[in-house]
């Protein structure tokens, strides 16, 4: 169908203002943070109700129109890219908090609610939504759930999956399923809620979610430590976890630090180190702070830490977090090739060493920037484009890097995508993390919920 014909099909349902075909809208809604595919949607649809979503899916099935979900468009796997004339279903107008129950400590939201919006709503109720990441100001809950987003607090609070007690979804058939209904305990067979979490819109669209909240953390404190090597990073993690319930344990390399400092973030201390750790914990008493300082001194005595600083105020805590949170922003001008990978925590040092060695051997002109959520085994490998190299040649050479990296991931029984989904960027490498039998069952599930293949085709699975 032509672009005009597709738009004319949906205009009686949504009207002119919510059925967009102009170039600016197609560019804005048809892309995410990846840049490997140019957006080329046929139309952008902006539903406001569940009934409208169901009707969109019904029409898509009837006329064989592919649908791509669009949330905050902050993904890094091209899961929300419409590059082949698909109709984009953007949930920006389904952005309301629908209900809150103080006894259940649960909030019901539409999929277009922005992560930060939910965090602020929870705070207004004296509670806390702990799933947090750099894109919290623009990412939407539907996308977070669709990719099972993680972030900086996973070591304490887990992934998005751990906070979803109910989902309403419109399947690829157009059926509305009300899954788990906010229950904490429910032993009535298959829990389809968890099938849709992380499915990247390939089985259906999330149209409502019930999210549990928890108590607010109190008197948070941050330590930033300079560490001589990756083995010492793990020793520091183990030492602190033995005695303190950490809310975060992040790491970044000296190269990552250099880029952040160049963007105006103050250096935390004079001593330079190959690696840095950022630890966050609740300082509920003077004794907790004293215990953290005693552990710091112990790590220095053991030679695991070269220098460090502990926050003395909320302002200093926020400033120290900038060292970690502004890494992506600071390396963005260098056209980074990103890989979001994970192994079990104990295997991190050996894994990073193998990856480092092979990239430096094959491409000594590439700058490697490591950072990530070391407390949960999730590393972000960033390779920066040399200024003299064209973007096309750089990404072509980096495809070789991905194959080598994922072969090492497979060797360590890790994941090729820790928290950003598979989409199109990781789809060719899925076999490195999933067996042929698993992929076969995934295809069967896709066929069951989306028999005509209208839901986000070409993502996750062919």
Image (spheres, grey):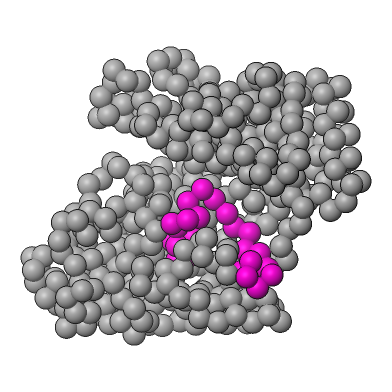
Location of the N terminus by quadrant is bottom left
Residue 440 in view? no
Residue 222 located within the stretch drawn in magenta: no
User: Which of the 4 image quadrants contains residue 346?
Assistant: top right
The percent coordinates of residue 286 (x first, y second) are: 89, 47
The mark tally for this picture is 0
Q: Quadrant of the C terminus?
A: bottom left
x and y, in percent, of residue 351 in the image: 60, 30
* For residue 187, side relative to residue 21 (left or right): right
Indicate whether 265 appears above or below 40: above
Q: Is residue 224 above or below residue 245?
A: above
Q: Nearer the viewer, residue 320 or 332?
A: 320
Residue displayed at 47% across by 56% down: 137
Query: Which residue: 63% across, 59% down?
Result: 130
Which image quarter: residue 329? top left
Q: Going by the image, does 331 lie left or right of 65?
A: right
Q: Which residues are magenta?
A: 122-146
x 47%, y 63%: residue: 114
Is 369 on the left or on the right of 385, as rendered? right
Q: Position of residue 259 (x, y in %)?
A: 49, 27
Q: Residue at x 22, y 47 (%)?
A: 38
Is residue 142 a member of the stretch shown in magenta? yes
Residue 139 in sight in this render? yes
Q: Taking 457 as reference, is 359 left or right?
A: right
């Amino acid at each position: 169908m032509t672009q005009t014909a597709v738009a004319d099909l949906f205009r009686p349902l949504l009207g002119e203002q919510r059925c967009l075909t102009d170039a600016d809208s197609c560019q804005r809604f048809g892309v995410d943070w990846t840049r490997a595919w140019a957006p080329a949607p046929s139309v952008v649809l902006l539903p406001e109700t569940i009934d409208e979503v169901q009707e969109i899916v019904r029409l898509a099935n009837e006329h064989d129109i592919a649908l791509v979900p669009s949330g905050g468009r902050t993904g890094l796997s091209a899961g929300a890219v419409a590059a082949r004339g698909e109709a984009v279903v953007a949930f920006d107008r389904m952005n309301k908090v629908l209900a809150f129950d103080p006894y259940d400590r649960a909030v019901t939201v539409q999929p277009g609610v922005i992560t930060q919006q939910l965090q602020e709503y929870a705070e207004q109720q004296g509670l806390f939504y702990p799933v947090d990441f750099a894109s919290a100001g623009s990412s939407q809950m539907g996308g977070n759930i669709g990719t099972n987003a993680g972030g900086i607090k996973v070591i304490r609070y887990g992934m998005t999956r751990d906070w979803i007690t109910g989902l309403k979804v419109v399947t690829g058939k157009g059926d509305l399923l009300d899954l788990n209904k906010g229950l904490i305990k429910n032993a009535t067979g298959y829990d389809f809620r968890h099938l849709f979490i992380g499915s990247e819109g390939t089985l259906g669209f999330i149209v409502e979610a019930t999210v549990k909240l928890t108590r607010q953390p109190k008197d948070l404190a941050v330590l930033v430590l300079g560490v001589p090597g990756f083995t010492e990073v793990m020793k520091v993690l183990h030492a602190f976890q033995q005695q303190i319930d950490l809310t975060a344990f992040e790491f970044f390399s000296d190269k990552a630090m250099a880029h952040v400092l160049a963007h105006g973030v103050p250096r935390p201390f004079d001593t330079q180190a190959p690696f840095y750790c950022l630890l966050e914990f609740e300082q509920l008493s003077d004794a907790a702070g004293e215990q953290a300082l005693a552990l710091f001194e112990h790590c220095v005595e053991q030679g695991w830490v070269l220098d460090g600083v502990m926050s003395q105020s909320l302002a200093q805590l926020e400033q120290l977090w900038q060292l970690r949170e502004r890494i992506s922003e600071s390396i963005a001008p260098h056209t980074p090739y990103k890989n979001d990978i994970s192994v079990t925590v104990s295997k991190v040092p050996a894994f990073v060493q193998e990856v480092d060695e092979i990239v430096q051997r094959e491409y000594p002109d590439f700058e490697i920037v490591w950072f990530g959520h070391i407390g949960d085994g999730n590393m972000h490998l960033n390779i920066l484009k040399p200024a003299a190299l064209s973007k096309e040649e750089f990404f072509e050479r980096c495809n070789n890097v991905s194959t080598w990296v994922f072969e090492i991931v497979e060797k360590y029984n890790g994941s090729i995508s820790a928290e950003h989904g598979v989409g199109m960027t990781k789809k060719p490498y899925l076999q490195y993390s999933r067996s042929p039998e698993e992929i076969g069952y995934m295809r069967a599930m896709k066929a069951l919920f989306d028999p005509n293949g209208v839901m986000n085709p070409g993502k996750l699975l062919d």
